Image (cartoon, rainbow, N blue to C red):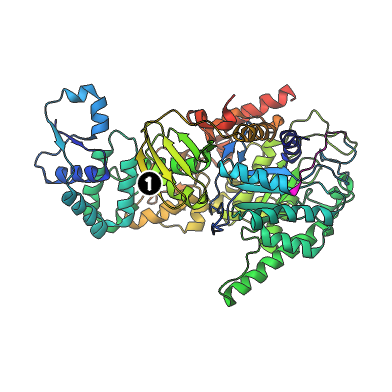
Amino acid sequence: MKILVYENTFQGFLTAIYEAFYSLEKPAKIISKFDYLRDFQLQLDTEVVEISVNQEKADKVYNAVLKKISTGTLSNLYYLFLSSDFDKGILAFYYLKFAFKKGKYTDNYLVDENVKPVHDIVWKVKQEKHRMKGLLRFKLLDNGIYYAAFEPDHDITELIAPHFSRRLGDQFWIIHDLKRLKAALYNKEEWIISDLTEKELPPLSAKEIEIQEIWKKYFKHISIKERKNNKLQKSFMPVRYWKHLVEKEE
Amino acid sequence: METVKKMAILADSAKYDVSCSSSGSNRKNSGGVGNGALSGICHSWSEDGRCISLLKTLYTNNCVYDCAYCINRISNDIPRASFTPRELADLTIDFYRRNYIEGLFLSSGVYPNPDKTMENLIETMEILRKEYKFFGYIHVKAIPGADPLLINKAGMLADRMSVNIELPSEKSLRLLAPQKSKEKIFKPMAQITQGLMQIGEEKGKYRFSQKFVPAGQSTQMIVGATNDTDLSIISLSQGLYDNFKLKRVYYSAYVPVNEGPNLPALIQAPPMKRENRLYQADWLLRFYGFKASELLDQDNQNFDMDLDPKCDWAIRHFDFFPVEINKASYNEILRVPGIGVKSAKKIIKMRKFGKIDFLGLKKLGVVLKRAKYFITCNGRYSEGLYIYPENLRNRLIQKKPADMQIKIFQESGL
C-alpha cells in the first residue's frame, strides 16, 4: 500500500496531488505530515513516500484546475485542504481525476461518488466559518488589544480574518487558534498569520469584567422560561464551542 | 441604577418580541466600526433555543398604554427602568467590539408620549451612527402615533423598521388594546412602504441616494391570545407581503403574563405547535408560491395540528400528483412534500446532466419518507410502493420527539 505524505501547506497538498497523477502505482492514501506523525500504525508502513513542496508542480495543478475546470472547483479544493478530514488528500485526487473528465460542469454532479464527499466536507468547513463569525468572542486586554481564542474543527483562521478586518477595522485584534497554535494578528491596517504558542495572556482591561457581567445578565434574561428548550439550543450551538463563550462561563 | 440591573429589567421586558434577524443589509464600514452581513449572523442561542443576533432591549419599560396581553402595561406592578441614549449607545459599541452582537434592536414602551419616545430612539441611533461611526445593524420600532417626520428620520438611520400589528383583527385590538387601532398601526407602516418605494425610484436617477431602511420592514402578531383563526392570520400576512412589501411577518405564541377577563388563563402553555404551523405556512407563502386561500378556506379555518400545511394541501389535492422529477417545472417540484427550496434547485441543476432516480434524490437530501407518495422518477413510482389515498393521511402523520416534548410540557402545566 503506497502512502504519500505531504507538508502541511496548500502548495504541499497540490504537489502531492501532482505526484499522485504522475506515478504509475496509484497511492492508497495521501496524508498530511501532521496526521502522519500522529498515526503510529501508518508509520509502520514501508511504502511511505514523503513529498516535499515543489512550487512548480503545485502551480501546474493550480493553473490546470483554473483553466480546464473552474474557479469553483479550485475554491472547493482549498476548503478541502483547510478541513481536518483525514482522507482529504485521496478525496481531492479522485475529485480532480473526475473533474478533468467533466470540465467546468464537474460540480453539477451533486451525487457522484467522487464529488459528493468533497462537497459535504466543504459544506462543513463553510458552516463552521459562518458559525465562528458569530461565536468568536473578543476580550479587551489592558494593552488595548482585543483577543479571541477559539478551537475550531477546521483550520478556518484565515477564512474569518478578512471578515473581522472589515468589521472591526479600527481596533487591534488577535484571533488565536489554540488547537493549531496559530493566530491572525491585525494592526488596524492589515492582518497576518503567525505561529502563536503563547498561552499566558496579559491581564484583562479594567472594564472587561464589567462588560462581561452585563452580557451574561442579558443572556440569562432574554430567554423565555416558558419556552425553555435546551436541545434546540445545543443543536444550533454545539457544546464543543461553549468553552470560549463568555455567556456560557460560570 | 447600575447598568447591569437596567439590562436585566429591560431584557426581561423586551424578550417577547420575536424578531432578531440581522439580514438584508450590506452597509459598508467607512472608517468606523461595524458593517452589515447580507445573510445575517447569529451570535448566540439562549436557553429557549432562540437565536441572539441583536442586542434586543427596550429603551424604557415605562408605558402609558394598558394593553391587556403586555407585561409592560401601566397597570402592572413590575420593576421599571430606562436607559439614556448615551448609555445604550455605549453598551452597543462595547458588545459589538467583542463580537457579542450584530447590532441593536431598539424598542420602547410609550412614555410619556409617542413623539418623545421616538425622539429618544432617534437620539440613541444618532450617537451610534454619527458620533461613534457605527455601521452595524440597527432594527428600530416605529412607534404608532409618532410624527411622520420622526418616523422618516428614524428610517434614515436604521437598517430595518417594524411596527407591530399585535393582534390580527380590529375586534381583537378593541378587546385587548383599546388605546391602539388598526389605523394607527397601518399609518406608519404605509409611510415606511412609501419611503422605500421612493428611495427605489431615486436609486435609478442618482448615483448616490440616501439609505432608507435598506433591510425593509417587518411586523409581529401575537397568536393565541384571542380567538382569531389561522385563516384570518395568514390572509392578513399575505396582504402584508403583497401590498406593504414586508420582508417578514413574525408570529409569537402568546405567553400568558397577565390575568384578565378577556385573556387565556395564566396556566395555559404557549401554543407552540400552532406558532410552528403558522411559520410553515408563512414559508409556503414567501418561497413556495402558495396563496393563503389554497392553504385554508371557510371549511378549514385552522391548520391541522398533526400534519404540516404542505402535506395537508397535497393530500387534499391528490389529483395534482404524481410529479415527474425529470420533467416537471421548478414550481411543480416545489409543491411536493419533503422537497424544499434547496433540493428543488439541486434537482433542476442536476437533471441537465442525467436522469435522476430515487437513490439520487435520497443523496440530495429529499425526504423520501414523505415525497415518495407524490413523485415518479422516469415514469415509475418508488419500487414496492402501494398507495391507498384514503390511508395516506395516517401514513404521513408521524409523532416526532419534538411533539412529545411539547406534550410533556403542556401536561406539566408550566
Q: Chain of mark 1?
A: A
Secondary structure that dominates the magenta span: loop
Range shown magenta: B77-85
| Quadrant into which the C terminus of chain B falls | top right
Above or below, B321 against A141 in this view is below
Residue B58 point in image, percent of width and height = 75, 44
Residue B261 highlighted magenta (yes or no): no
Q: Residue furthest left?
A: A24
- The 10 Å Cα crowd at callout 1, few under 14, some 14 to 19, many 20 or more, is few
User: Taking B368 as reference, is B232 left or right?
Assistant: right
Q: Is residue B53 visible?
A: no
Judging depth in this view, the residue of A53 and A174 nearest the camera is A174
The residue beneath circle 1 is A192
Residue B82 highlighted magenta (yes or no): yes
- Callout 1 secondary element: strand
Q: Residue at x 82, y 59 (%)?
A: B146
Q: Residue at x 48, y 43 (%)?
A: A173
